[in-house]
Amino acid sequence: MKYEDIINLPHHVSKTRKQMSMEARAAQFSPFAALTGYDDELDEAGRLTEERQYLDFDDQKRDELDRILKELDEHATEHPEIRVKCFVPDKLKDGGEYVQFSGYYKRVDISDMTLCFTEGKKIYLSDIIEIAKI
């Protein structure tokens, strides 16, 4: 039989070196990544973003948004519940995504051109592509 002469020998313990911890031993067998962060870069490069849509001044959609904003402003004291679809720019690359926010309308702040919710959220008017009362 193979290894018969050593199979039952006691485990060797060095008298001059300290025994390695289990974590240190496990680290010897962990996968090696020669390019740290490369996988993250690949994931980021593969992440898709949407291109921003711009509304023209003569666009029917823009006129509809203006009409809804005017109507909301007339009922601002009632704080109507609304849903807004808007563009959120990506912090890491060109483009972004369109997301929907729901909340209670407070007002349009002309000084920074934002739509304000009662909860404190602000959305730039130039980022909005849809508004609907709920």
Image (cartoon, rainbow, N blue to C red):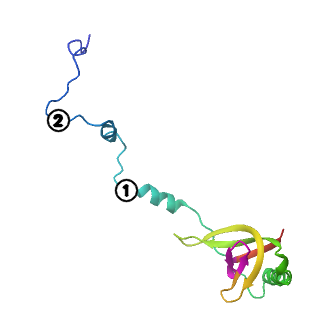
In the image: residue 27, left or right of residue 43: left
Which of 3 and 12 lies nearest the eye of the viewer? 12
Quick one: which residue is furthest to the top in this view? Answer: 1
The magenta region covers: 115-127
82 over 75 or under it: above or below? above
Query: Earlier along the polypeptide chain: callout 2 or callout 1?
Result: 2
Mark 1 neighbour class, 10 Å CA radius: few under 14, some 14 to 19, many 20 or more? few
Residue 50 lies, in percent from the top left, at 63, 69
- The local secondary structure at tag 2 comes to loop
Kindly report the distance in space between the C-alpha atoms of the residues bearing marks 2 and 1. 32 Å
Residue 23, which numbered label? none
Which amino acid, mark 1? Answer: Thr
Query: Would residue 50 appear left or right of 22 to someone viewing this image?
Result: right
**Quick one: which residue is furthest to the left in this view?**
16
Quadrant showing the C terminus: bottom right
Please, what is the three-letter code of the amino acid marked with disc 2? Arg
- Can residue 15 be spotted in the picture? yes
Q: Name which residue lies at 78% across and 72% down.
A: 104
Question: Pointer 2 and pointer 1: residues touching (CB < 8 Å)?
Answer: no
83 displayed left or right of 126: right
Q: Residue at x 72, y 79 (%)?
A: 115
Q: Residue at 84% of width from left, 83% of height from top?
A: 67
Identify residue for label 1: 36
| Quarter where residue 36 is shown | bottom left
Which residue position holds label 2? 17
- If the image is split into quadrants, where does the N terminus sit? top left
| The one of 26 and 30 positioned closer to us in this rendering | 26
Q: Is residue 85 magenta?
A: no
Quadrant assignment, res 55: bottom right
Question: Quick check: 125 above or below 3?
Answer: below
* Horizontal relation, residue 121 to residue 104: left or right: left
